Image (spheres, rainbow, N blue to C red):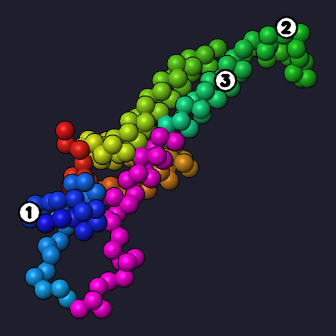
Amino acid sequence: MVCQACGNPVTAEVHFCPRCGAQVVAAPVSPPNPAAYPPAYAMRPPRVQRHLQTLGILWCIFGAYRIVSGLIGLFVMRVMTFRNFGDPSWDWGWGGHFHGAPWMAFLFPIIAVVSVVTAFLAFLVGFGLLRRQSWGRVLGIVVAILALLKFPIGTALGIYTLWVLVPAESGMEYDAIADHS
């Protein structure tokens, strides 16, 4: 028996092709009437297979976005805490000098750690989904739930990821195409 989508040889007890993830159906004994075949657009691959590459790429882009936004946040915090912006004669116009808030200096490591951890997780999810790793789906669901808090981009990506990966059918489809090595 072969997969109808990619031609990969499969065994009779397999329901999804391990190579492309398409559903494998047993060939009928006698071919039906050619007019009974569904149109080409109806023979689409399963939902997880259609969206997996897009999800992986979007998670990698989100990781890069988190790094850039963290660097911008660190720059803004540094500018806000730098004493008089390096010029002791600089006046803000209301008669006083801005000396920076010392408590803001404690935010540097927090912003740096949060940016690095979220970017690392986003890249890891992207890698896991693109490489179809067996742990990619579970990590993707967990990180998508956390990303819901990062409005608006993280929220949109989290909802899209949960829509693709959470249903029970998605779990079976992903297990069929996952690399279990």
Residue range highlighted in magenta: 33-61
Label 2 amino acid?
Answer: Pro
Tag 1 and tag 2, C-beta contact below 8 Å: no
Report which quarter residue 15 is drawn in: bottom left
Where is mark 2, residue-wise?
Answer: 88
- Lateral position of residue 33 relative to residue 94, left or right: left
Label 1 amino acid?
Answer: Glu
Residue at 51% across, 29% down: 115
- Lateral position of residue 10 relative to residue 168, left or right: left
Q: Main secondary structure of the magenta part?
A: helix
Q: Quick one: label 2 or label 3, which is nearer the N terminus?
A: 3
Q: Quick one: label 1 or label 2, which is nearer the N terminus?
A: 1
| Distance Cα–Cα, label 2 vs label 3 | 20 Å
Q: Position of residue 111 (x, y in %)?
A: 54, 25
Report which quarter residue 78 is drawn in: top right
Label 3 amino acid?
Answer: Phe
Residue 75, numbered label: 3
Instruction: Give yes or no for residue 168 being in the magenta stretch.
Output: no
